[in-house]
Structures are given as structure tokens and as C-alpha cells.
Image (spheres, helix red, strand yellow):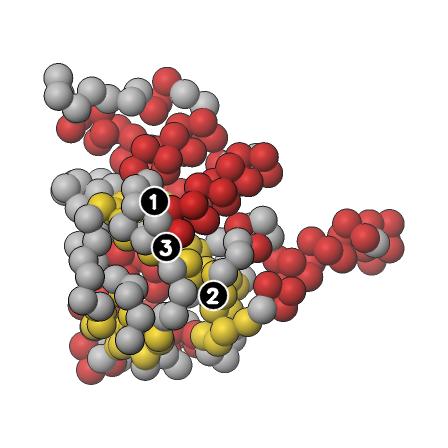
């Protein structure tokens, strides 16, 4: 067995209603169990393929607030998470994480607001709303990154320039080398290139391991950069 905090997940479909929209997501519907072997796991796939749905369920099953934050965050502005976390079983290793964070692009504003509400003299607010979206997004990620932590990032590239994505790229790699474990749903061809990461592609058939060069994000980006004029002629 490896030393990862989360080593495997399995789904009990008897816990999911037969009319649930989860039954209509092919990649999720085909999943019974998924094993992890690397400290960085990347979920790749088209919009609506189920990668964020699975990441969210894993984060909630690990004890994080559905809208994001640390395990100490307890708030809800809109109940949008699926029932998948109730059917999910996490197989854990012998080690337990000492830190963690669930970062998701779509509810970042709410988390930044709660960070101010939770602040006090001993824990002053970082005033994320007073920074640009990209600066605050990267800042909140870096603030909570620590060795031996468990992290779930849902499309962290959403507010970041390519340069800032490279900064996050280096931070993720550094802390993974220090015992942290990451699960990241992303479209970024930059983040998908993090060394020593395993990539799972969410397709219309299943969830399967794939190589960096096989991801749609890489293929389409490479085609556009290397054949821009031909690409535009076909599109327009």
C-alpha cells in the first residue's frame, strides 16, 4: 500500500436514487471504484463530464464544506451539491492529513466573505475582496498550502493568468514533495503538465488514466498554437 491519505474511492449505487441526474453522467455512472497511486491526481475532461461532481463529493466525504474552505468552515449560501458524497466510500491510508482546503472557482466569493466573518484579533482577515480576483485566488491557495495537507482544487486556473498558473504549478509540486496530496479538476494545459501526476480523463464512456499529451486541453492548445491560420479557417 502507498502512503497517500486517500488511496481509493468506491460508489454504492444503491444509495443513489434511480432518477438522480448522476445516472445521466456516463463517466460517473460507469464508476464503481478508482484507485490512486500518486500525490497529485488530475481530473481532465469536457464541461459536464463529471469531474467537478466527483471532486466535490470527495471533498465533502473528506469533511470539507460543500462551498469550499477548510474543515472549520460551516456555511451554506446555496445547496447545490449532489447526493454522491453519501454513496462514496474513501479508503484511507494509515497516515492522516494535518491540514487541508477545498478551493472551488464558482463559490470563491462566498468563501472570501466568510473568511472575513470568521476573522478575529488572533486570526486577522487577509481582505481577499480588496485584491484582484486573480491575486486573491492565488493568495488564498498559497495561504493554506502546507506539508502533509489534503487539497481539493476545482478549476483553480479560472482566475489566473498563465504566469500565475505557473506559480501555482510550482507550489503544488513543492508541497506534494513535502507529503501533501492533491485532487485537481482542471482544463489548464499548464496544470495538467505537473510532473509525477496521474491524470484521469472523464469521457462519454468512463473514467480512465491518460497521458498528458492525450488530454483534449493539450491537443487543442497545441493544434491552435502550431496551426493557427488553418485552425481559424476551419472555425470561421
Work out which quarter of the rendered image holds the N terminus and state it.
bottom left
**Mark before the other along the chain sequence, 2 or 1:** 1
Q: Residue 198 carries which label?
A: 2
In this rendering, the answer to whether 120 lies above or below 109 is above
Q: Is residue 28 visible to us here? A: yes
Which residue appears at 37% of the width and 35% of the height? Answer: 142
Which residue appears at 49% of the width and 65% of the height? Answer: 199
In this rendering, the answer to whether 57 lies above or below 116 is below
Circle 2: element type: strand
Residue at image mark 1: 103
x and y percentages locating residue 88 in the rendered image:
23, 71
Which residue appears at 43% of the width and 45% of the height? Answer: 174
Check disc 3: other Cα within 10 Å, few if <14, some if 14-19, many if 20+.
many
Check disc 1: other Cα within 10 Å, few if <14, some if 14-19, many if 20+.
many
- Depth check, front residue: 93 or 55: 93
x and y percentages locating residue 205 in the rendered image:
50, 79
Q: Is residue 52 visible to us here? A: no
**Mark before the other along the chain sequence, 3 or 2:** 3
Amino acid at each position: 500500500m502507498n502512503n497517500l491519505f486517500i488511496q481509493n474511492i468506491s460508489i454504492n449505487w444503491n444509495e443513489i436514487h434511480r432518477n438522480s441526474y448522476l445516472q445521466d453522467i456516463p463517466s460517473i455512472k460507469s464508476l464503481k471504484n478508482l484507485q490512486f497511486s500518486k500525490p497529485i491526481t488530475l481530473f481532465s475532461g469536457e464541461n459536464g463530464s463529471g469531474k467537478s461532481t466527483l471532486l466535490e463529493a470527495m471533498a465533502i466525504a473528506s469533511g470539507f464544506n460543500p462551498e469550499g474552505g477548510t474543515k472549520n468552515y460551516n456555511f451554506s449560501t446555496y445547496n447545490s451539491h449532489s447526493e454522491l458524497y453519501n454513496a462514496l466510500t474513501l479508503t484511507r491510508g494509515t497516515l492522516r492529513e494535518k491540514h487541508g482546503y477545498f478551493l472551488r472557482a464558482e463559490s470563491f466569493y462566498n468563501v472570501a466573505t466568510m473568511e472575513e466573518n470568521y476573522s478575529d484579533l488572533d486570526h486577522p482577515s487577509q481582505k481577499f475582496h480588496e485584491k484582484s480576483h486573480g491575486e486573491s485566488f492565488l493568495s488564498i491557495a498559497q495561504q493554506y498550502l502546507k506539508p502533509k495537507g489534503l487539497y481539493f482544487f476545482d478549476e483553480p486556473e479560472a482566475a489566473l493568468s498563465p504566469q500565475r498558473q505557473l506559480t501555482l504549478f510550482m507550489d503544488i509540486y513543492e508541497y506534494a514533495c513535502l507529503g501533501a496530496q492533491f485532487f485537481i479538476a482542471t482544463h489548464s494545459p499548464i496544470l495538467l503538465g505537473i510532473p509525477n501526476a496521474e491524470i484521469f480523463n472523464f469521457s462519454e464512456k468512463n473514467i480512465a488514466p491518460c497521458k498528458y499529451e492525450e488530454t483534449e486541453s493539450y491537443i487543442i492548445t497545441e493544434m491552435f498554437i502550431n496551426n493557427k491560420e488553418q485552425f481559424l479557417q476551419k472555425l470561421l
